[in-house]
Amino acid sequence: MDGSNIVTADDTNFEFQVLEYSQLLPVVVDFWSNWCLDCRRTSETLESLAEQYAGRFRLAQVEVDKNPRLTKGYQVRTIPTIKTFVNGGVTGQLEGVHTNLQIEEYLKRFVPGPERLLLEKAASYLKDRQFISAEETCLEILEEDPDNPAARLLLAKSLLWQGEYLEALTILHHFPASREFQAAEKLVPLAEQLRAASSLESSGNPLDAIYTRALGLIENEQIPAALDGLLEILKRDKKYRAGMPHKVVLGLFELLGEDHPLTEEYRPLLANTLF
């Protein structure tokens, strides 16, 4: 099956169809044989994914019996074997029989799906402080994939920046198990304290005024002043409100992002305060 996204590769055209083309897009090479039933199923899955991904990668099919030089050169010891080429070199491989889901998960490591492009767009909006656009983009992703953890995390952050604390907490309290789960957990105390800021009861501690003011500064997006206040509380009493100022600071770092200048500036200050 030949086409712009699915091609037949052999000893004569491999350099052009795979190595050179992989400078432009990832090329997934399917090493197969006509007598191998498992190969046929793998090939059908890859062909379907090539159509689904619509030009985000090229599928090159190599029949091993007819191309011994390629088979030996790329150390294909079993079939089916899938190898991915990027910039002229092998960047990954999948050997043997795998489910359709496993093949797709492998592919996603090298080829951005449509949801990943939208995630990058949402993250860019968030970084540029276009919070409504970030929210709308996340909702677009979640319409197709309701449990997408990266989109849910970005949505929660965009809602927090907009002061929609209850909506953000609804997402954070029902967050799916994923690599984003810990990040979501860090945002929970921040969201809870901001939502309760106007009704926090005084404990009779003189630090209450500083704490309430710090939460108000966060709401008004005066983050450096808020962080200064929270660190001042921790300098005076690390156990104030069961260490909640510390949790709020960590939530702010997560909301800002690890590469934000304020996170980079205040993280060592927090460490010095605590230790």
Image (tube, grey):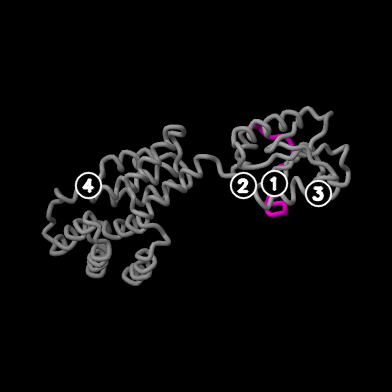
Q: Earlier in the sequence, mark 1 or mark 4?
A: 1
Q: CA distance from mark 1 to mark 2?
A: 8 Å
Determine which of the numbered discs, if any, sits on residue 195 in the image.
Answer: 4
Residue type at tag 3: Tyr
Picture residue at 88% right of the left edge, 43% below the top: 68
Residues 191 and 58: in front is: 58
First of labels 4, 3 by sequence position: 3
Q: Is residue 268 visible?
A: yes
First in sequence: mark 1 vs mark 3: 3
Residue tagged by mark 3? Answer: 74
Measure how far apart labels 2 and 3 are at the Cα level.
19 Å
Residues tagged 2 and 3 counted as in contact (Cβ below 8 A): no
Q: Amino acid at mark 2?
A: Phe
Q: Is residue 42 left or right of residue 130?
A: right
Q: Which mark is residue 84?
A: 1
Residue assigned mark 2: 110
